[in-house]
Image: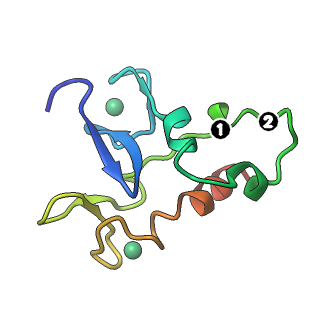
Amino acid sequence: MGIGDNITVNQFQFCLDHGSEVCWLYCFVDHREDNNARVSGLKQALGKGPAFDLNERKAICAYDLGATPGKKGGYQCKSHSKTDCKKCFDWVKVIKGLEK
Ligand SMILES: [Zn+2]
Ligand SMILES: [Zn+2]
């Protein structure tokens, strides 16, 4: 576990040590721009005005959402023990919830 190691959960990247999408304090990473590019229709889904900068949105924490390492690699959710669970790691929904 070195500095700069990342994990991937349902295509989104987070720092390994904290599960954070943005971790300036410890890991010096900001994955928001890359992660935003992996979901389509995010801006429309959020219903924000054109002035809203997606790269400044509130960061997701994968570990807060229950992401744990799966037996076969990858990361799974707590509720369904499913790798890259589309329900628990529905990023558009998660981001929407954070931006409310
Ligand atoms: Zn970190
Ligand atoms: Zn799940």
Determine which residue is flagged by label 1. Answer: 57
The N terminus - image quarter: top left
Given residues 40 and 27, the one toward you in this image is: 40
Which residue occupies the extreme bottom position in the image?
80
Marks 2/1 in contact by CB < 8 Å: the verdict is yes
Q: Earlier in the sequence, mark 2 or mark 1?
A: 2
Instruction: Dividing the image into four quarters, tell me where ligand 1 lies.
Output: top left
- Residue 64 x %, y %: 41, 54
Relative to 11, is 18 above or below? Answer: above
Q: Is residue 66 above or below residue 27?
A: below
Determine which residue is flagged by label 2: 52
Left or right, 70 with reference to 56 = left
Amino acid at pointer 1? Arg
Query: Going by the image, does 88 lie left or right of 71?
Result: right
Q: Secondary structure at mark 1?
A: loop
Label 2 SS: loop
Q: Residues within 10 Å of mark 1 (few under 14, many from 20)?
A: some
Q: Residue at x 65, y 58 (%)?
A: 97
Mark 1: C-beta under 8 Å from nearest atom of ligand 1: no
The three-letter code of the residue at mark 2 reads Phe
